[in-house]
Amino acid sequence: MPNSGATTTTDEVLDGIDLSGRRILVTGAASGLGKESARALAAHGASVTVLARSPARAAGAVADIAGLVPGADLEEGVVDLADLSTVRAFARGFLDTHDSVDVLINNAGVMACPFGRTADGFEMQFGTNHLGHFLLTVLLSPALLEGPAPRVVTLSSAGHSRSDVDLDDPNFETTEYSPWVAYGRSKTANALFARELARRAGGRGLRSFSVHPGGIITDLGRHLTDELINEMAAFAQERARRTGSGDTGDSGITWKSIEAGAATQVWATVAPELADHNGAYLADCGLGVLGANPGVNGFMPYLLDDDHAAVLWELSEHLVGMKFEV
């Protein structure tokens, strides 16, 4: 792909690519990066299942995308990742009517919200960002593994650099709650999940990647207060100084358009050159760089901790009450 990098857009990634006949599911597709990914993929012929946390949001997104892409093959579904009963209900209905899935994009998420618990009692960020997607992926795995070259793309974030996962207290039952630490734990969990999924299902042909989209102004930031924004900026500035890489400006963050922010997850969906990099962490339409600035395209060493990834997987199976059978 020519001129790939931080400013590459979804349409540039997909230029010349025909996705006709491929079924792609996108969570959090009612707005932001998910909606842009769904639009771009549908515009290039994919059959896209638009997933959102309410029927109204899903229907609205489908109507908007259909207006932008006349003739698009779209269907809607309801998945509230903070309520695992909706994940199970969607998966049951979907598997009743679909034999296979080509790509699942685990895009939805919540960021730096006040302390809360999901309908199932999990800390909100860990429960929504990781456990909801974990269960959805496991439930859809029979259909994914029927595809000729299935992929699962899971959004992580530079926020993973705030914290490794806490396998002893994942739900902040004994630890004092911090919105940014909780977000960091959940984003590390996303990356470790992608890596462990690659290890477990790679032999069946499945490819799994985690993605840092970059800094984008979307509805994900709806919980941010001035205090949280200042804390984020201070941490990002220190992170940039510590790694000595990337021109991130005064904020310590490189900002992107929504079209550029969604590009890496779309690239992970289609790029043939990623076939030999199963489990990789991606950023700026390329492979992540160990030790570089996570605010740009770097990642922390603990994203390569396979022991942590395996224990997190087993813990997740226990918490959601569902085992993954390859």
Image (cartoon, helix red, strand yellow):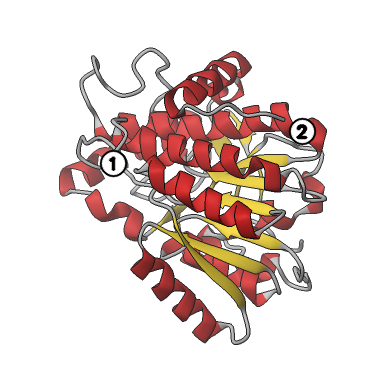
Task: Say left or right for 315 vs 124.
Answer: right
The image shows a total of numbered marks equal to: 2
Picture coordinates of residue 68, whole percent (x, y): 53, 83
Task: Say left or right for 229 vs 33.
Answer: left
Q: Is residue 271 visible?
A: yes
Q: Identity of the amino acid at label 1?
A: Ala
Seen at 81% across and 52% down, the residue is 272
107 versus 180 height, above or below: below
Q: Identity of the amino acid at label 2?
A: Gly
Seen at 35% across and 61% down, the residue is 54
Task: Give whichever of 296, 152 is nearer the camera.
Answer: 152
Extreme front residue here?
A: 96
Q: In which quarter of the image is residue 193?
A: top right
Task: Give whichever of 27, 2 is nearer the camera.
Answer: 27
Q: How crowded is mark 1: few (under 14 residues within 10 Å), some or many (20 or more)?
A: many
Q: What element carries label 2?
A: helix
Seen at 28% across and 41% down, the residue is 112
Picture coordinates of residue 98, whole percent (x, y): 67, 58
Mark 2 and 1 residues: CB-CB less than 8 Å, in contact? no
The C terminus lies in quadrant: top right
Q: How far apart are marks 2 and 1 (CA)?
A: 33 Å
Q: Is mark 1 on a helix, strand or loop?
A: loop
Residue 125 is labelled as none
Residue 202 is labelled as 2
The N terminus lies in quadrant: bottom right
Picture coordinates of residue 60, whole percent (x, y): 39, 75
Residue picked out by circle 1: 112
Q: Can residue 156 be seen in this view?
A: no
Task: Say left or right for 147 vs 37.
Answer: right
